Amino acid sequence: MKLSQAELAKYMDHTMLKPDATADMIDQTIAEARHYNTASVCVNPYWVHRVHEGLAGTTVNTCTVVGFPLGATSTASKVFETKQALTDGADEIDMVINIGELKSGHDQAVEHDIRAVVEATHAHGKILKVIIETCLLTDAEKVKACQLVVKAGADFVKTSTGFSTAGAKVADVKLMRQTVGPDFKIKAAGGIHSLAEAYAMIEAGANRLGVSAAVKILQEAAQQ
């Protein structure tokens, strides 16, 4: 597989989710995203307004995370976080499912949690990605989680937060693609540090990549 640097950049959510990210680090991430014209900049909710303003006049979206990174906050708080982020200028919301409820077999609770955030996001015409945290799930649970994400009406299913025991795996992206079919979107995130790893995720079925190493990967692409 070979994509141009510009094509590859549009797969990338350029990510800065470190808990100690400073305003300068956020501004650097914005500048890099503007330079390479990535799909989005993904930051914690506090920084959404700054990123939205910093990306004005570009085609780069502002992305943020909700119920992050554990997913174990109340549905009401996830909806509030979502609405606040949209008010602040977010274009894309990446929420974490209630992992414990999924593992308990409480499918309706998981679907309700996702659907509430779907409705809040889609009311503003924006995009919702749903993080299922694959590293904590069995294959059967991964399939079930994907089915619930599709059923609840989200736009993407996403592998990982990058803050748990492991990130995206090619095998998981393939399983997710088999489960959701050819048209539903998948985001792979966590542990993608090289051009080869980025290509492997895209070939497995990923439509979007969550990467903090976007600059390194895109420089590698330019060299090829």
Image (cartoon, rainbow, N blue to C red):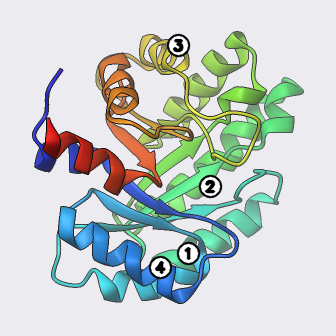
Q: Residue at x 20, y 41 (%)?
A: 221
Kind of residue at badge 1:
Lys
Kind of residue at badge 3:
Ala
**Residue that lies at the very extreme toward the front in this rendered image:** 223
Q: CA distance from mark 1 to mark 4?
A: 22 Å
Residue bearing mark 2: 116
For residue 96, which numbered disc appears in the image? none
**Location of residue 161 in the rendering, given as x and y in whole percent from the top left corner:** 63, 46
Q: Residue at x 79, y 37 (%)?
A: 99
Kind of residue at badge 4:
Ile
Q: CA distance from mark 2 to mark 1?
A: 11 Å
Kindly state the secondary structure of the residue where label 4 is placed.
Answer: helix
Residue bearing mark 1: 83
**Residue that lies at the very extreme toward the right in this rendered image:** 104
Q: CA distance from mark 2 to mark 3?
A: 30 Å
Give the label, 2 or 1, closer to the camera: 1
Give the label, 1 or 4, closer to the camera: 4
Residue bearing mark 3: 171
